[in-house]
Amino acid sequence: MNDLKPFLERILELEKPWYIREISLDQESWKIDIYLDFKKGGTFSCPLCEGKDRQQRKAYDTVEKTWRHLNLFQYKAYLHARVPRVACPEHGTHLVHIPWAREGSGFTLLFEAFAMSLIKLMPVAATSQIVDEWDTRLWRIAHAYVDKAVEEQDLSSLTALGVDETSRRKGHCYITAFVDLHEKGAVFVTPGKDASTLEAFKDFLETHGGRAANVKDISMDMSPAFIKGAEEHFPEAEITFDKFHVMKLMNKALDEVRRQEQKGNSALKKSRYLWLKNPENLTEDQKESLRKLGGASSNLKVARAWRIKLALQDVFTYDSNWAPYFLDRWHWWASHSRLDPIVSLAKTIKEHRRGILNYSKSKISNGILEGLNSLFKAAAAKARGYRTLRNAITAYYLVASRLELGLPQLCGVTHTI
């Protein structure tokens, strides 16, 4: 085994004064132990001193530590070393920086890079089975890299913001995500779905290079809590009510009309998606069925509600000169439709008229957020939910952000299971 020392020193990229003192193989436990040491008289710099000309100091004493490394062939590999402490006149006595592992971690940097590459593709529970480690230890790795990347963000250029909430598990507590609509990635995720989430984001923004006054546009749904938070903490921003949310409310009202009418008209059974889907997304058979049920001569209530829906969709295609005119015409039609769900929706639309019309100027929506939420929900479904809120937030960042995690390059190294 000692013949492998020079080879493994090159692979581990060890530099003086570090060297491999001993290698032992335990075939019964399928384990390789690599013992590192530093040459007698070796010197180290204080980890807290800055600058290139840090004074080198001899070891004050040492602390024994162990790290799990990438597997070597079919064997688990562990690095062991007595890590020196140095006494610095300015900062006191501290453990020196070691090049192969992150401070406080029980894994090498390359093991963490491999684990994170898997975690980004599959649930942590599945990753734990592949690498044969407790999932709680892997979550600690993910938290460390994500938390660091979140704190290192520069948000000085953020001017357009998307806000939306999602649940970490069906029927369970919520998290709210904030997305830079220009960069198209989540920049902040926090527990809750009330006005305090906007306050939390403002504080985060202003400690990461941004300013609340620089945020000129915010896209959100019609949540009273979000509206209150935005008006209080981002007074310079124009609120645009997400057109997808508006149309979701429209579809809900339309479907209520269908369900009420279906009770007395069996022809409407199994027709739900004919009315809810956009016409261009229907199959030829569905289009033919829709023509029979909802043609111009149809006196069905749901057909009337469907035409009102199409007119509302058209409002979002006009510029800021024409959108107010067509929204007001739509409101008159909807409010006089004698369809209770549609009349109720018309009242809601009127109350939020300004934010809806802002779309004709800002052209922003939560379409990006809806897509990111879908990615998160798919990941959560594969993981069968997340045990803790912190795990859910970390998972959201991993699937929905553009964070630079600062992982070391694996350089083609593979992990043998």
Image (cartoon, rainbow, N blue to C red):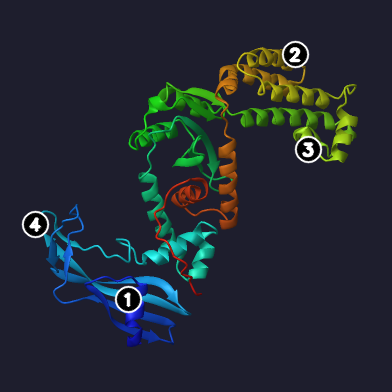
Depth check, mark 3 against mark 2: the one in front is 3
Amino acid type indicated by mark 4:
Pro
What is the quadrant of the N terminus in the image?
Answer: bottom left
The image quadrant that residue 199 belongs to is top left
Left or right of residue 235, residue 96 in this image? left
Depth check, mark 2 against mark 4: the one in front is 4
How much space separates mark 2 and mark 4, taking CA atoms?
82 Å
Amino acid type indicated by mark 2:
His
The residue under label 3 is 273
Left or right of residue 371, residue 179 in this image? left
Categorize mark 1 by other alpha carbons within 10 Å: few (<14), some (14-19), many (20+).
some
Callout 3 secondary element: helix
Whether 359 is drawn above or below 400: the answer is above
Residue 312 percent coordinates (x, y)? 70, 22
The residue under label 1 is 9
Callout 2 secondary element: loop
Residue 354 percent coordinates (x, y)? 56, 17
Residue 343 percent coordinates (x, y)? 71, 19
How much space separates mark 1 and mark 3, taking CA atoms?
64 Å
Depth check, mark 4 against mark 1: the one in front is 1
Left or right of residue 87, residue 76 in this image? right
Depth check, mark 2 against mark 1: the one in front is 1
Whether 24 is drawn above or below 314: the answer is below
The residue under label 4 is 89
